[in-house]
Amino acid sequence: MDEVKMLISCVVEKEGQKMVRISFLRGKDYAEGILPEGIVVKSEGFTQEEVKKLEDYIRANRQDILRQAKEINPFRNWING
């Protein structure tokens, strides 16, 4: 794969469940994954094989992604943005 950038959301609560959204960007291609499921819920431009690799990456790095998401303060970032 060419260079893929990853963006991680803060931890959000939806329907009583905590979740994190992970976005993968490569030029005009994108994929959006979620934790705790560890799946890609939508993508465009990535092949099925690449989507599987992204899901494997999300699952393998679940703890690190969650740690990073917990450190994000959306209000501080919004105010200082």
Image (cartoon, rainbow, N blue to C red):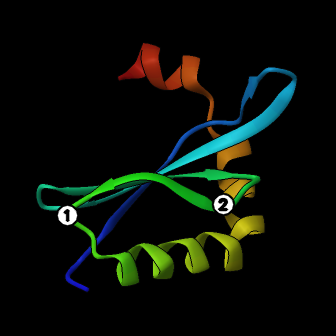
In the image, is residue 24 above or below residue 58?
Answer: above
The residue lying at 80 percent from left, 35 percent from top is 18
The amino acid at mark 2 is Ile
Location of residue 21 in the rendering, given as x and y in whole percent from the top left corner = 56, 44
Q: Which mark is residue 45?
A: 1
Location of residue 14 in the rendering, given as x and y in whole percent from the top left corner = 74, 23
Residue with the mark numbered 2: 65
Mark 2, Cα crowd under 10 Å, few <14 / some 14-19 / many 20+, is: many
Q: Secondary structure at mark 2?
A: helix
Which residue lies most toward the front here?
48
Alpha carbons under labels 2 and 1: distance apart: 23 Å
The amino acid at mark 1 is Gly
The residue lying at 72 percent from left, 67 percent from top is 62
In the picture, measured across the screen, residue 68 lies left or right of residue 30, that is right
Mark 1, Cα crowd under 10 Å, few <14 / some 14-19 / many 20+, is: some
Location of residue 48 in the rendering, given as x and y in whole percent from the top left corner = 37, 76
